[in-house]
Image: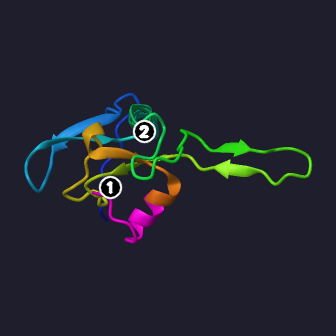
Amino acid sequence: MIYPCPKPPKTERKPSRLSRRNKSDGQQVEICRDRESWEERREEVGSDADYLCQHCGDPAPLHDVEIGREEGVMPYIIRAGQAAHRIARKMGGAFRNDEASNLRWLCFQCHHLETVGKLVIA
């Protein structure tokens, strides 16, 4: 019976951001390994864009914002902006790169349309 290798102790954690060589072209790229480092990177990209979509110019705040919460008024929610990869992030593949230069700030609608292939953003 084969047993898996033992887990490293919790004190020996991997760094939150990892720099490694890209498989396709050999360049150094940065990867966010945990949620905290990704949130920091996301906030950095959003603040650089003044929390406006870099495609359509609509407001794209850091978190969802609810507007019009009054008696008898249906609330309107402005969806949070999203840090979208310029070169697609493929599940651990050759183009995985979380550097700020590879990210842009998009509103929810533009990011969704780009993801499903109905919008091409140059």
Kind of residue indicated by mark 1: Pro
- Residue 33: x and y, percent? 35, 41
Report the colour scheme. rainbow
Does the magenta segment cover residue 12?
no
Report the mark closest to the observer, 1 or 2. 2
Residue pictured at 32% horizontal, 59% vertical: 121
Residue pictured at 32% horizontal, 32% vertical: 15
- Residue 91: x and y, percent? 31, 60
Bin the neighbour count of mark 2 within 10 Å (Cα to Cα): few under 14, some 14-19, many 20 and up: many
Relative to 38, is 4 above or below?
Answer: below
Q: Which residue is at the far top?
A: 11
Q: Which residue is at the far right?
A: 71
Specify start and end residues of the magenta stretch as a single range: 111-122
- Give the mark, 1 or 2, whose residue is nearer the N terminus: 1
- Residue 35: x and y, percent? 45, 40
Residue pictured at 73% horizontal, 44% vertical: 67
- Cα distance between the residues tagged 1 and 2: 35 Å
Locate the C terminus by quadrant: bottom left
The disc placed on residue 42 is 2
**What residue would you read off at disc 1?**
4
For mark 1, give the secondary structure.
loop
Kind of residue indicated by mark 2: Arg
Does the magenta segment cover residue 114?
yes
Bin the neighbour count of mark 1 within 10 Å (Cα to Cα): few under 14, some 14-19, many 20 and up: few
For mark 2, give the secondary structure.
helix
Q: Is residue 97 left or right of residue 61?
A: left
Instruction: Name the image quarter holding residue 29.
Output: top left
Relative to 11, is 64 above or below?
Answer: below
Relative to 60, is 120 above or below?
Answer: below
Instruction: Name the image quarter holding residue 24.
Output: bottom left
